[in-house]
Amino acid sequence: MVIFTVFKVDLKQYGLFQIRKFELKTVLQILELSIFIMFQYFLSISTWFMFFIFIEHMGERPLAVSNIGRSLYILLMIPASALATTVNTLVSNLIGAGRKEEVVPLINKVAFISIILVLPLMIFTLVFPELMARIYTDDQSLIQASISVIQIVSVANLLFAGFFIVFNGVSGTGNTRTAFLMEVVTLLFYISYVYYTSIINPSSVAVVWMSEFVYWILIGGLGYLYLIKGNWRKKEI
């Protein structure tokens, strides 16, 4: 990236690689936005870690099934994750250009594209869960045990495809504090559901994995409500 930038970008126009002095005010302004993103990712990863701790208490087989589900889930997430990162940048660009009225239509459009892209993957995974499980294991009993989790993951990925776009749209407005608060509220419900279904009232591993529905519906709903009703249009960065 550095080599490409040096040879293809006008360094003088953008003042690249020219650090004249340390500007504490600028650093603090950047931290004001980024610190909530730091906390947000820390909480998100910590909660994901706790999820597998709770699953581990359910036994060796549920943990093995969950590892297959997690691996496949991450694989299926790739298209929507790329679009979510893109919409984050595009929302910021629109706001910077003074075109705030185009933000929500843009998010709706990208969310629709994301869902259309992921839909064939969901259908294939939903219809052929055994085939997907065979990527990870030849153990027939483990394959059969993984089917329900794989099907839940496939549907959850469709929710992810739409709602993660919305949530990244919120972050793209520069309201990282609001995005962090949404994450906190959602994770409280999420981890409570996981704890109840895995520890307090032990259920099947598939029921525990339905926590993904809780997470994406809540965070997507809060994000969309904020984009429609919130005061992000008045924020100046």
Image (cartoon, rainbow, N blue to C red):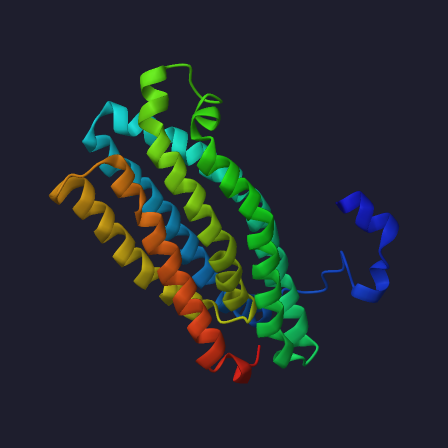
Hey, which quadrant is residue 54 in on the image?
top left
Residue furthest to the bottom in view is 234
Q: Residue at x 35, y 28 (%)?
A: 146
Image coords of residue 197 (percent x, y): 19, 44
Can you give x and y, in whole percent of width and height, for residue 172 in the image? 56, 66
For the residue pair 204 and 198, the one nearer the viewer reads as 204
State the image coordinates of residue 25 (x, y, percent, origin top left): 56, 72
Question: Which x, y percent locates residue 193?
Answer: 23, 51
Q: Is residue 207 above or below residue 85?
A: above
Q: Is residue 60 above or below residue 85?
A: above
Lateral position of residue 175 relative to residue 84, left or right: left
| Looking at the image, residue 177 lies above or below residue 39 | below
**Residue 119 in sight:** yes
Relative to residue 138, is residue 47 depicted above or below? Answer: below
Image quadrant in which you'd find residue 58 = top left
Q: Is residue 225 left or right of residue 118?
A: left
As drawn, is 48 to the left or to the right of 37? left
Which residue is painted at 36% across and 67% down in the image? 181
Query: What quarter of the picture does the N terminus occupy?
Result: top right
> What residue do we see at 33% from left, 40% from top?
49
Residue 230 seen in this snapshot: no
